[in-house]
Amino acid sequence: MVIPACEQLTPLGGGADACVPAEVQAAFDRSCGGGSCHTDGGKAGGLALGNGEAAAAIGRASVGSALPLITIGDTRGSYLAQKMVSDPATPITGDRMPVGFQGTNADQVADVNTILGWVAGGAYADCGAGTDTGNDTGNDTGTVANGLPCDVDAVLATYCRSCHGDPPVGTVVSLLGLEDLLADAPSDPTKSLGERSVERMNADVAPMPPAPATRPSAAEIAVVADWVAAGMPAGDCTVGPGPFDVEPVCTSKKNWTGGNEEDPRMHPGVACIDCHTSMDEGPDLLVAGTVYPTGHEPDDCYGSASILVHVTDASDRTVELRTNSAGNFLLEDGEAPAGFGPPYRVEVVSDVGTRAMSSAAPHGDCNACHTQDGDDDAPGRVVLPW
């Protein structure tokens, strides 16, 4: 697992009153509470991780080890964390958690990373956990030097930062600059995040980036691997702000003005399926959304034309869509394979590369979550690879 460095983070206090961030609780609910395992009704191993219960595991003795269940700021000293990693530093009792873990399951991988990031001491807005790590190499404003060689930065930008950016998506890790790559990997403090990143890119099981994202070529991995092997010397590559680090703007300077006139270009940025359903008009859509060049474009602003969008359904069937002149991509029920349904894995493809969602989407109304400001943990719009 690739999770952030925590040697500069302030550990949380323990006990039932400690804060468990909402996204961490959601990960516990999805991956640990199923089948009445670690819930109030189940408490497998005497451990309940339901809402209002998980914090009580901080500092509490574990059943299968001399380690406490959770020590915030120390994954190696937390038995719960050791149960969730592929190479535990401490022997565990029973199977790896969560039950039935599959490294090819992007949702499970995201949940495990979220939980491990919290145990490691990561900062979350709704809890205020941790302190600033001193990493000021992120792409917050203007053009900045991130301390990386440009060829290394290009690989990370193409294949990693759609999740490990600022803000990170589906994880708490940012891979923006030299300090990030030099930091210890909490899952194995004997290795740097740079070393672990190379291992994950080369992995046959649970590779990075996860499916359906395109993996880097052997030559691209070698760029990062050779740099890591050389001791990760500093570079002077400068990078501009990421697509979510800019103010709201209609990049195309063109807006839809046709009201509710039926047209595939209508209302870019608006939740198409919700609108068609509530008004009981228009074609039945299974998947619909808009692709933009930046992350906070307003409703009715035209997006990016002629961009490929690959949508893979629960049965692993893929449909290729292309955005129209307004940036909209649409899949009508009658044009889809029979039974084509969620959860959907979605990737956007351009000449720059591929940008894939970090986890499967529960429905096809993309703009319902990918609003101007982002809802349901989306950082903003569906954006082009960068």
Image (cartoon, rainbow, N blue to C red):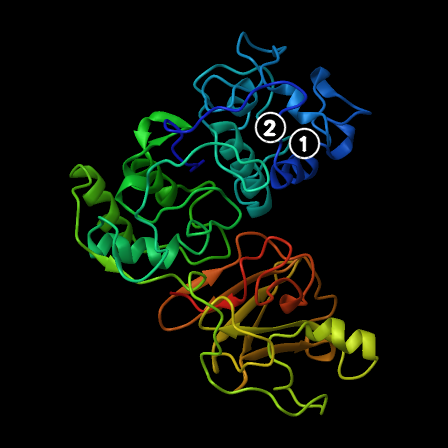
State the residue position of label 1: 32
Alpha-carbon span between mark 2 and mark 1: 8 Å
Residue 225 in percent (x, y) is at 24, 43
Q: Nearer the viewer, residue 47 or 52?
A: 52
In the displayed structure image, the side of residue 250 where residue 215 appears, left or right = left
Q: Residue at x 52, y 72 (%)?
A: 297
Q: Nearer the viewer, residue 211 or 68?
A: 68
Q: Nearer the viewer, residue 294 or 18?
A: 18
* Labels 2 and 1 touching (C-beta < 8 A): yes
Q: Residue at x 33, y 41 (%)?
A: 135
Q: Nearer the viewer, residue 37 or 218?
A: 37
Q: Earlier in the sequence, mark 2 or mark 1?
A: 1
Under mark 2, the amino acid is Met
Residue 231 in percent (x, y) is at 17, 36
Q: Is residue 176 above or below residue 272?
A: above
State the residue position of label 2: 97
Q: Is residue 368 above or below residue 138?
A: below
